[in-house]
Image: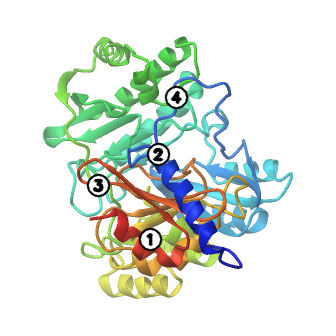
């Protein structure tokens, strides 16, 4: 229990009884429940121009489509963090960057800095450029195609679309090169490359998909998003995600098929199949020194770590780095030579980044927690670090949340540690049989024993 003194045994038992009662009503799914289709407020998702007031200062979320940054743009983000914020760069589960601790009244200066660096190609679309893409696409010889042309075309098309301005800041596109890494992230519109030059277009978690020509992938993705905007607007309620629209019954699939056909895009109905096992690149050298992949513990990068990555990117022929939805960074290094790449990997390790596959940090995530978030009931990052040695090497990863909202929690199976009023955490997971298992964790140092109670 994270307190100055432990309570008496009677109080601890009383708290445990209360927790067991709460467990009976806890959701059985290992993923956060879908938001209701109806809302009584607008989308307050932060962006580069709409800042969010947090307990540690203002917060900006900078969209980075596909996670791709030139070395120059990466340096501009570091400058913004040092000049205006807390000096750190925070990676999100969509491969975007958050700047935290921003000082009062810096909005115009921040926007000007980002615009000068090319990070704000359209002010009207800055919150809707949410695109994840296979981070190793075109680098390691896997996948059916390099999705970079899709990414460039979709981002440009989004910024030209007046209708796309109405998308929620939570609406997500996924461009998968066929390996299945981002296809399992629960995007609203997913395009996945298949053999033969085609692509599968899918909507939300629907089991239906359409086989389309690969060269039409970006246009088809935008068509689907624009039709979603039409139907969401006509629904009479505030709907932000495709699965929310499905929950109230919708003609979205039929309308999308009609629009694609009318636009000259050949469509064949297919079973979407099971989504891929979402997971990021293993840290280390990729292929024959084609890239370096690292992981940032809890998604937080110091200015030193970020600038080491930026310098490596500036020295490599590609001149870029790629942020991943798993809070990691890939730097393409083809042409630098194996020896030089290995030396840089040592520098990144010395800077505190994860550069190998065995680190328990690869299996741990957390929201910002205290003191940055007023809603949080605990300093979850501190507690996650305290319990790091007890994180199991197998099974679902662990995610620490400061409250029931579970902000930033990636989709998929997880062991959830959710802070509860009065101290401690509700630890829960879903077993192989689909049954929910929960227990009360009073002290992060006792994580191993608590996990033994709820996992096979």
Dot 4 or dot 3, earlier in sequence: 4
Whether residue 103 is visible here, answered yes or no, is: yes
First in sequence, mark 1 or 4: give its number.
4
Element class at badge 4: loop
Residue 26 circle label: 2
Looking at the picture, the colour scheme in use is rainbow
Residue picked out by circle 3:
431
Q: Residues within 10 Å of mark 4 (few under 14, many from 20)?
A: some
The spot of residue 107 in percent (x, y) is 79, 49
Compared to residue 18, the image places residue 341 above or below, namely below
On the question of residue 321 being in view, the answer is no
Q: Can you say which quadrant of the picture contains the C terminus? A: bottom left
Which residue is rendered at x = 18% and y = 39% of the image?
197
Mark 2 neighbour density, 10 Å: few (under 14) some (14–19) many (20 or more): some
Question: Which is nearer the eye, 354 or 16?
Answer: 16
The disc at residue 295 is 1
Mark 3 or 1: the one toward you = 3
Where disc 2 sits, the SS reads loop
Marks 2 and 1, Cα distance to the nearest angstrom?
32 Å
Circle 4 or circle 3, nearest the eye: 3
Residue 36 - label: 4
Badge 3: residue crowd in 10 Å (few <14, some 14–19, many ≥20) = some
Q: Earlier in the sequence, mark 2 or mark 1?
A: 2
Q: Give me the C-alpha separation between circle 3 and circle 1.
A: 28 Å
Alpha carbon of mark 3 to alpha carbon of mark 2: how far?
14 Å
Real-space CA distance between mark 1 and mark 4, rounded to the nearest whole angstrom = 34 Å
Q: Residue at x 38, y 17 (%)?
A: 252
- Disc 1 packing (10 Å; few <14; some 14–19; many ≥20): many
Q: The N terminus is located in which quarter?
A: bottom right
Ranked by sequence position, the earlier of labels 3 and 2 is: 2
Q: Earlier in the sequence, mark 4 or mark 2?
A: 2
Percent of width and height locating residue 327: 47, 62
């Amino acid at each position: 229990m994270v307190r100055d003194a432990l309570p008496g045994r009677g109080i601890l038992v009383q708290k445990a009884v209360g927790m067991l009662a709460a467990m009976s009503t806890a959701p059985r799914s290992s993923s956060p429940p879908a938001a209701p289709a109806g809302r009584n407020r607008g989308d307050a998702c932060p962006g580069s121009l709409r800042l969010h007031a947090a307990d540690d200062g203002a917060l900006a979320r900078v969209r980075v489509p596909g996670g791709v940054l030139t070395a120059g743009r990466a340096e501009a983000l570091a400058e913004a963090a040092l000049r205006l914020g807390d000096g750190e760069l925070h990676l999100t589960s969509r491969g975007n960057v958050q700047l935290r601790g921003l000082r009062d009244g810096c909005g115009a200066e921040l926007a000007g800095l980002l615009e000068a660096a090319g990070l704000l190609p359209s002010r009207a679309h800055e919150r809707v450029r949410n695109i994840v893409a296979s981070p190793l696409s075109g680098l390691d010889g896997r996948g059916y195609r390099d999705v970079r042309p899709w990414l460039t075309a979709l981002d440009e098309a989004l910024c030209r679309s007046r209708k796309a301005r109405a998308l929620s800041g939570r609406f997500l596109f996924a461009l998968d090169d066929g390996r299945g890494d981002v296809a399992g992230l629960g995007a609203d519109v997913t395009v996945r490359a298949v053999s033969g030059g085609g692509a599968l277009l899918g909507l939300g978690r629907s089991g239906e998909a359409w086989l389309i020509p690969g060269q039409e992938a970006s246009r088809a993705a935008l068509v689907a998003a624009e039709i979603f905007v039409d139907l969401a607007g006509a629904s009479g309620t505030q709907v932000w995600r495709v699965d929310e629209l499905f929950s109230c019954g919708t003609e979205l699939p039929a309308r999308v098929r009609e629009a694609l056909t009318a636009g000259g895009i050949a469509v064949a109905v297919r079973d979407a199949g099971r989504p891929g096992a979402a997971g990021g690149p293993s840290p280390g050298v990729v292929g024959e020194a084609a890239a370096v992949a690292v992981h940032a513990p809890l998604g937080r990068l110091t200015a030193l770590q970020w600038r080491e990555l930026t310098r490596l990117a500036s020295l490599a022929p590609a001149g870029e780095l790629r942020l991943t939805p798993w809070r990691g960074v890939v730097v393409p290094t083809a042409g630098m030579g194996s020896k030089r790449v290995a030396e840089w990997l040592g520098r990144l390790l010395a800077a505190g980044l994860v550069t190998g596959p065995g680190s328990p940090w690869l299996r741990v995530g957390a929201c910002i927690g205290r003191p940055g978030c007023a809603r949080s009931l605990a300093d979850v990052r501190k507690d996650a670090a305290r319990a790091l040695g007890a994180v199991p090497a197998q099974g679902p990863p662990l995610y620490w949340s400061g409250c029931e909202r579970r902000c930033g929690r990636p989709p998929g199976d997880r062991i959830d540690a959710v802070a509860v009023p009065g101290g401690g955490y509700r630890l829960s997971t879903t077993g192989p049989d689909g049954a929910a298992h929960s227990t009360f964790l009073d002290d992060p140092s006792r994580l191993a024993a608590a996990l033994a109670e709820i996992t096979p």
